[in-house]
Image: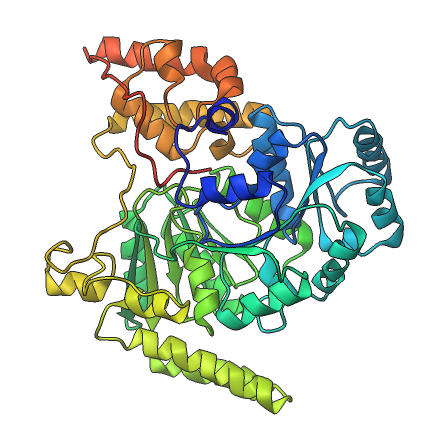
Amino acid sequence: MKDLLKQYFGYEQFRPLQEEIINHVVQRNDCFVLMPTGGGKSLCYQLPALKFSGLTLVISPLISLMKDQVDALRACGIKAEFINSSLSPKQITRICDQLKDNQVKILYIAPERFALNDFRNFLKGLPVSLIAVDEAHCISEWGHDFRPDYRNLSLIKELFPETPLIALTATATQKVREDIINQLRLQKARVFISSFNRANLRVSVVEKKQAFPKLVGLLRKYRNESAIIYCFSRNDTETIAADLRANRFKARAYHAGLKASDRAAAQDLFIKDEVDIIVATIAFGMGIDKPDVRLVVHYTYPKTLEGYYQEIGRAGRDGLPSECVMFYTYADTRKHEFFINQIEDYSLQRRAREKLNEVTNFANLITCRKKYLLKYFGEELGGDNCGGCDICESWHNDPEPAGFEPEPASRIEDYNKELFEELRVLRKHLADREHVPPFIIFGDTALAEMAHYLPPDEESFGRINGVGAKKLEQFAAIFLAVINDFAQKHNLTPKDIPEKKRHNLLDF
């Protein structure tokens, strides 16, 4: 498995729980995986897919994300396809022919596609070795993102009784977990729960006074880096995006009221690093797999902690330090309550109010925010100081006298910033040429390692995290030319890259 990990994905080590889950799946067992965004969930089915002889079917609600995931797999030398409503009938027929000829390893489909009788019958005729249900919380009415089409997935076990099934989600309370397990008939499945603590994220709440100047100050700190700003209304997104552009920021609004083509264009510009800032309603983010978002701001506080956790989870998926800021004023409660009062079902209204109270409690804390957030998801955080929220930082305690052990981060901090920028420019140029987002070429962590170790040849370049066999063959010469030229010009000596590095936070 480690050989496959290095060969295709370019990594030496698994993250916590990954190896255990993968071995369990390879032995043809069902499992339920609860792992935070950025924890490396996708690898839990992508690696077994390479080991199985047949097809791995991935059911995902994120149509906008499927293309990125397929591009990323192809860039690693894996035969992957997707079928969804963005394709023409002719394109779908071509992919179905490839599936019949066993030419596809991983197929992504939307739940709506699985709901079609003809398509289900077509799938039954294929050698399906593994089925993965991504964003599995969408099947639960108790979840924050229920999708009726997911209810059809309860048929999976009936149609494919011998095929192992893996359900994955990043956010699920105990109630939602039980619902997913019941709906997908996973009663005998093993449950894997990873830590919800994202050690690289700094979480803070600031008073919503002079909010726009505070926002500009934050964005200046992250100039030319990717940021997402969540707002309450469509009107807010348009106004703030326009005001940011007037302050010379590259910002675009994103909300459900825009034409589909305008939404797709905004998302595409953001993913391709043409636009740095997306100002959005919660309609944005589910289809974003961008690993280098450095800042997430909630301009209006969110209505649930599940939503909040999922939205801040879009920051720092590559394991590098990133910031999550919530602007809070009690006055915004009235906005939320107006909509809660429109809910006719009393029990649903009561539940929405309880969830809102959890968020206001979180905003008003005088104790560790991460401790409170993790406890909400059923996890106890050791020690008294997380070292990663505004409350704990204001105490000045050293996290290790407090008995808190931070998760080890694999980040390289003393890399050459000038070379890093040159490599970013090169990456952008290659990405545009290949018509893919820059992170599909290499993540920021890989570029930081290149700018730290200065690998002089292919052998050492191959040891950089994220450099698998296909990328070594495709990109080594181009990147080495820039690295060696820079090293020569500035009289810099390459550093030895350890054979086995401890890597916990990688951008799979």
Q: Nearest the camera: 472 or 422? A: 472
Regarding residue 35, the answer to whether it shows in the image is yes
Report the coloring of the rendering.
rainbow
- Residue 197: quarter of image: bottom left
Q: Answer above or below: position of 157 versus 394.
A: above
- Residue 154: quarter of image: bottom right
Outermost bottom residue:
346
Q: Answer above or below: position of 422 versus 24.
A: above
> What residue is rendered at 50% in x and 29% in y?
1
Regarding residue 335, the answer to whether it shows in the image is no
Residue 199 lies left or right of residue 71; in this view the side is: left
Q: Position of residue 287 (x, y in %)?
A: 57, 50
Q: Position of residue 454 (x, y in %)?
A: 28, 17
Residue 321 lies left or right of residue 471; in this view the side is: left
> What residue is rendered at 64% in x and 39% in y?
67
Q: Position of residue 416 (x, y in %)?
A: 24, 26
Q: Position of residue 179 (x, y in %)?
A: 61, 69
Q: Nearest the camera: 174 or 450? A: 174
- What number of labels is visible? 0
Q: Nearest the camera: 73 or 335? A: 73
> What residue is rendered at 78% in x and 52% in y?
114
